[in-house]
Image: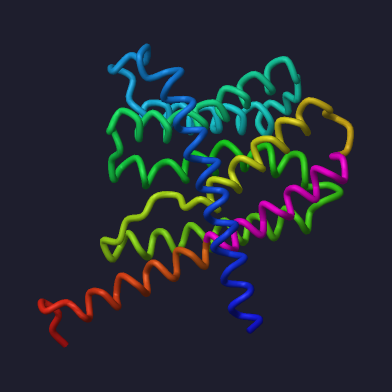
């Protein structure tokens, strides 16, 4: 009985998040699609996000530069590319396998420098668990890709990225003040989203193998 309740809750949550994401895509498509230059592909935005993440890492750790007038606009720009690339890819039918692979990598490259720099002091355990969860998430994705199983970011991975983008943008706005407890709670919620995303990927891999085993072309 409890399992059934949890399953229904999970499905309802998944449906609600997907509905919100679909409405976001529809809004952005209506707003941007007619004017978007076709020479700029979603993958270009993803590459730009990774480049911004590397730039932030260099500023924060090599030059110890925490100037908000420099860090905040670049982080916002990186978060904006994450908001746009998937929506543009879907609305313009420009989705690619490469995009599915590099999108979560670019997300982590953008988030990690700010996460490490802002959480390493008072919230190092939260940082530790976030990093471990993301490493595990990445390893499962790599394992799937090694077996020619490709799946893009699921809705829980997208929700995680949205929460973390909002939180770290807010942390940067109030830097060098310690992160507000509310933002720390949101990061723990994003941690839960990562774990659910991992479970969804494991289920997808198992489902793929089950379908392959039941295929008439499958041989032991």
Q: Based on the picture, tell me whether residue 176 belongs to the magenta stretch.
A: no
Tell me how the rendering is colored.
rainbow
Q: Where is residue 75 in the image (x, y as percent from the top left)?
A: 62, 27
| Residue under the image location 35 percent in, 30 percent down | 91
Q: Which residue is drawn at 61% across and 80% down?
A: 3
- The C terminus, quarter of image: bottom left
Q: Quadrant of residue 62?
A: top right
Magenta-highlighted stretch: main secondary structure? helix
The answer to whether 100 is drawn above or below residue 64 in the figure is below
Residue closer to the observer: 99 or 9:
9
Residue range corresponding to the magenta coloring: 179-197
Say which of 141 and 31 sits in front: 31
Choose between 76 and 115: the one closer to the eye: 76
Q: Is residue 60 left or right of residue 108?
A: right
Where is residue 178? Give x, y as percent: 88, 38
Q: In this view, does 88 lie to the left or right of 75?
A: left
Image point (35%, 14%), residue name: 34
x, y (%) of residue 188? 74, 55
**Residue 32, how many percent across, how many down?**
42, 18
Q: In the image as oriented, which residue stretches furthest toward the left?
A: 217
Using the image, determine if residue 106 lies above or below residue 191: above
In the picture, which quadrant includes the N terminus? bottom right
Instruction: Tell how many labels.
Output: 0
Dividing the picture into quarters, in which one does residue 72 lie?
Answer: top right
Position of residue 74 in the picture relative to residue 208 (left or right)? right
Q: Is residue 117 above or below residue 72?
A: below
Q: At 79% from the left edge and 54% from the top edge, which residue is drawn?
A: 124
């Amino acid at each position: 009985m409890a399992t059934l309740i949890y399953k229904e809750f999970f499905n309802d949550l998944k449906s609600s998040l997907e509905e919100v994401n679909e409405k976001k895509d529809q809004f952005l498509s209506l707003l941007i699609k007619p004017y978007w230059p076709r020479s700029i592909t979603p993958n270009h935005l993803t590459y730009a996000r990774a480049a911004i993440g590397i730039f932030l890492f260099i500023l924060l750790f090599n030059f110890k530069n925490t100037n908000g007038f420099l860090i905040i606009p670049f982080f916002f720009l990186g978060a904006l590319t994450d908001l746009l690339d998937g929506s543009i890819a879907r609305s313009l039918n420009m989705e690619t396998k490469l995009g599915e692979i590099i999108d979560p990598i670019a997300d982590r490259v953008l988030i990690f420098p700010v996460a490490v720099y802002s959480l390493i002091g008072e919230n190092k355990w939260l940082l530790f668990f976030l990093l471990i969860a993301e490493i595990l998430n990445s390893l499962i994705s790599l394992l799937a890709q090694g077996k020619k199983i490709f799946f893009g970011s699921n809705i829980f991975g997208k929700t995680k990225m949205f929460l973390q983008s909002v939180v770290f943008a807010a942390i940067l706005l109030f830097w060098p003040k310690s992160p507000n407890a509310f933002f720390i709670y949101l990061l723990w919620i994003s941690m839960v989203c990562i774990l659910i995303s991992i479970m969804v990927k494991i289920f997808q891999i198992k489902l793929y193998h089950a379908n392959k085993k039941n295929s008439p072309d499958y041989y032991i």
